[in-house]
Image (cartoon, rainbow, N blue to C red):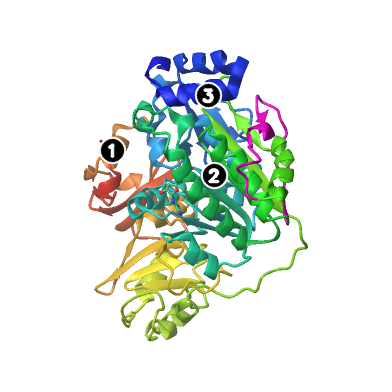
Amino acid sequence: MGSSLPEAFVTKMERLLGTEFPAFLASYEDTRWYGLRVNTLKCSVPEFQGMTSLKLDPIPWASTGYYYREEDRPGKHPYYHAGLYYIQEPSAMAPVELLDVRPGERVLDLCAAPGGKSTQIAAKLAGEGVLVTNDIHPDRVKALVKNIELSGARNAVILNERPERLEEAFQGFFDKILIDAPCSGEGMFRKEEEMAKSWQPAWVDRYAGMQRDLLKQGAAMLRPGGRLVYSTCTFSPEENELMIAEFLGAHPEFQVVPVLMRHGFQPGNPSWVDITEVSSMQAAAAAQQLQGAARLWPHQLSGEGHFVAVLEHRIGRAAPSKQSVFPSLMTAASGGKDKAKSRSKERYGWERGLTRRQPVLDLQPFYEFMRQMAPGVPVDSISLHGEHIYVTPQGLPDLSGIRVIRPGWYMGSLKKQRFEPAHALAMGLRLQETSRFISLSSDDPAVVRYLKGETLEMPEERVQLANGMEKKKGYCLVGVDGYPIGWGKWLDGMLKNDYPPGWRWT
Ligand SMILES: C[S@@+](CC[C@H](N)C(=O)[O-])C[C@H]1O[C@@H](n2cnc3c(N)ncnc32)[C@H](O)[C@@H]1O
């Protein structure tokens, strides 16, 4: 595809790369790389390797990442629908590896849709701490919601907000922040030829303006001593080295944490920062730190083009104050029947951020469902949005006025005194946690029929019971090789399908 690259782009790259340019250009004739990341929220890497027939080769810079062969089409396997892996371009796995997320941390993914890096962060948090994942575009947030739900993350809050509004709510709050910035996308031309066709030189300056704001806003939300990773999938120095030099000039309290240059990673290039363009002398001085940022070049490694800078705040570690999210809606105890009864008629207060009064709801059907179907799963921190019930992560600030799409793990909704479990609840559970389930084998044709939304004949002996459950009739968690794929309702030898229409196998 080298010949279909935009002329202005080719000229610019030739000027930047000099003697390396021919190798760079030749890489456009190579085939692209395909990667997937094992979702360790659901299964360990050895467990997955033991189950899959995919031919996998490790991606050297991603602990759970693997190259797969295009013809194997892992997106067309029931395990994909069970959320056992996420299909992700190999270079795109580097930023979260470098963010160094630890369980229990508070992490923000500021520009998150469709959620590749957010699901990677969720896996690294291993269910402890909180992931706040945001994207400004309402349509792209839909894909983010789907991917977070598929991943089974229980501790993610999904927002659709402008970063300047988040800045007010989350001053100094996060341990780690990822800014995977919107960019001119030059590194993706081999993967998405359409991007090459629509690219224009003016994009570089347009995106640079956005990136400048995002870095400033991200920095304000990081706690002292915290880490911020800035990444793009573009080559232009204006969006990469120059952006970081300017940021360091304006924020001397930050420094670049040098990335270990291995696996073909190359250092950032300070000489591409034209000191006549940066706004201050400090920025010109800071440019020297840019050798610590990493360039992933398609002619130097098996992946597409990326830039990653790891920035750390250098001043002490004061913990920000902790408050709860939606304090007016929090309920405290897990679902014992009596406690549930006494709470269930409570009138919930005015929920800030919503436009209508919270209706009086009897929560008992929800607590009863969880007590019977998933008795070991804590539901001690719930919030209500209308009839919708969520289990929320602890310790978030008040999110009044913020556009919250998911304040936590979506449990389901109350309709006419009945609880209807959400698909997100199914995907966040383990089959072993539930009291009534059907486990199908991945080579059973019933799996694809289930994923297509069909009602299935299902003999009674296929319904398995646990935790003292005696009734076979009712909601069942349906699994493939032991991993949930959704709900069904069993009655008299038939399994009524609850797989959501928008998720169906096509
Ligand atoms: C490179 S993509 C993110 C890819 C994502 N991190 C992943 O791994 O799947 C950049 C995203 O930034 C979003 N975006 C653009 N401007 C934004 C802004 N000002 N605040 C937050 N998100 C923004 C876009 O909608 C887009 O989804």
Q: Is mark 2 within 8 Å of ligand 1?
A: yes
What whole-number distance in Å separates the C-alpha atoms at marks 2 and 3? 31 Å
What whole-number distance in Å separates the C-alpha atoms at marks 2 and 1? 24 Å
Q: Residue at x 55, y 59 (%)?
A: 217
Q: Quadrant of residue 104?
A: bottom right
Q: Residues within 10 Å of mark 3 (few under 14, many from 20)?
A: some
Indicate which label's residue lies in the foreground, 2 or 3: 3
Mark found first going from the N terminus, 2 or 1? 2
Residue 139 drawn in magenta: no
- Looking at the image, is 78 positioned above or below residue 324? above
Q: Is mark 3 within 8 Å of ligand 1?
A: no
Q: Which residue is mark 2?
A: 120
Indicate which label's residue lies in the foreground, 1 or 3: 3
For residue 160, side relative to residue 167 (left or right): left
Q: Residue at x 28, y 44 (%)?
A: 459
Q: Which residue is mark 1?
A: 505
Q: Secondary structure at mark 3?
A: helix
Q: Which residue is mark 3?
A: 13
Q: Is residue 283 visible?
A: yes
Q: Residue at x 63, y 48 (%)?
A: 246
Q: Amino acid at mark 3?
A: Met
- In depth, the one of 401 and 444 nearer the eye is 401
- In depth, the one of 377 and 252 nearer the eye is 252
Q: Quick check: marks 2 and 1 in contact, CB under 8 Å?
A: no
Mark found first going from the N terminus, 2 or 3? 3
- Residue 125 percent coordinates (x, y): 60, 52
